[in-house]
Amino acid sequence: MADQLYLSLWFPNFRFDSLPAALVSVLRQFALISGDKRVSTATVYPISFTESPVYQRIFVNDDRSQSTEDSIIENAVSEATEQLHDDMAYEFEMKWNLWQPEHSGASGAELDALWKPRPRTVKIIGFGPQFDQATYEQNGHIRVDFGLDTPWVMDEEDEALDEEAQKHIQQNVEILLAFTLSVEKHSGISSRLLWTESGEPLAEKLIARLQRLN
């Protein structure tokens, strides 16, 4: 069953006024892996995610836009965090391309699918220390929301996966691990946790997946 996938990041001796710089660092690592330095949406939530945003900007990063300067990581973070409040969360959406199947067969099985790289949205969120009753203690000073884990684990019925499908799932896993290791190496974190909403141990699932594909 599909599960939400997250990466939680904690920083040593963390000061709230350093949150913008920490966000920029993590977003830059994501851009290195994705190849796109532009933020697609910036949103600021007060108190908890059940509240309406106090700030939101959706960037047009295509030929319709006269300028994309505002969506560059440093500019987007600077604007959204211009007024830091310790009971707010600062969310930035970016996109990366992962291999995903397009089903052509009537059965919908993966062996009938044509695999293509398609954009997926990733949310990178910095938490104020008073946001949602100090949720950072469990979620990290910064949390990365990858969405559903299906690009990395798919179904457990490996007999339905042909060689091409196996190759692309492994490529997705390598992209995920490359980003995680890049953040660990370059963003000055003290600890990290890759986890799923259900609590199922993702590391074991990924290792098992790679072992089956190899």
Image (cartoon, helix red, strand yellow):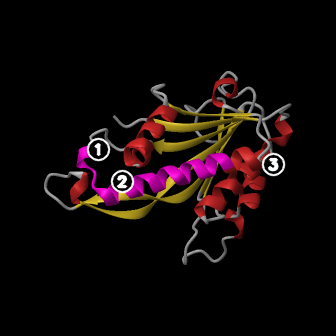
Which element type, helix, strand or loop, lies under badge 1?
helix
Which element type, helix, strand or loop, lies under badge 3?
helix
Q: Which mark is residue 166?
A: 2
Residue drawn 45% across the image and 26% down it = 198
Q: Nearer the viewer, mark 2 or mark 3?
A: 2
| Amino acid at pointer 3 | Ala
Q: Earlier in the sequence, mark 3 or mark 1?
A: 3
Q: Earlier in the sequence, mark 2 or mark 1?
A: 1
Check whether the beta carbons of the residues at disc 3 and disc 1 lie within 8 A of each other. no
| Amino acid at pointer 2 | Gln
Magenta-colored span: 158-181
Q: Residues within 10 Å of mark 2 (few under 14, many from 20)?
A: some
Q: How far apart are the two marked residues, 2 and 1, measured between alpha carbons?
A: 9 Å
Check whether the beta carbons of the residues at disc 2 and disc 1 lie within 8 A of each other. yes
Say which quadrant the N terminus sits in: top left
Q: Which mark is residue 21?
A: 3
Drawn side of residue 20 relative to residue 1, left or right: right
Give the quarter of the image for residue 159. top left
Residue 98 appears in view: yes
Give the quarter of the image for residue 54. top right
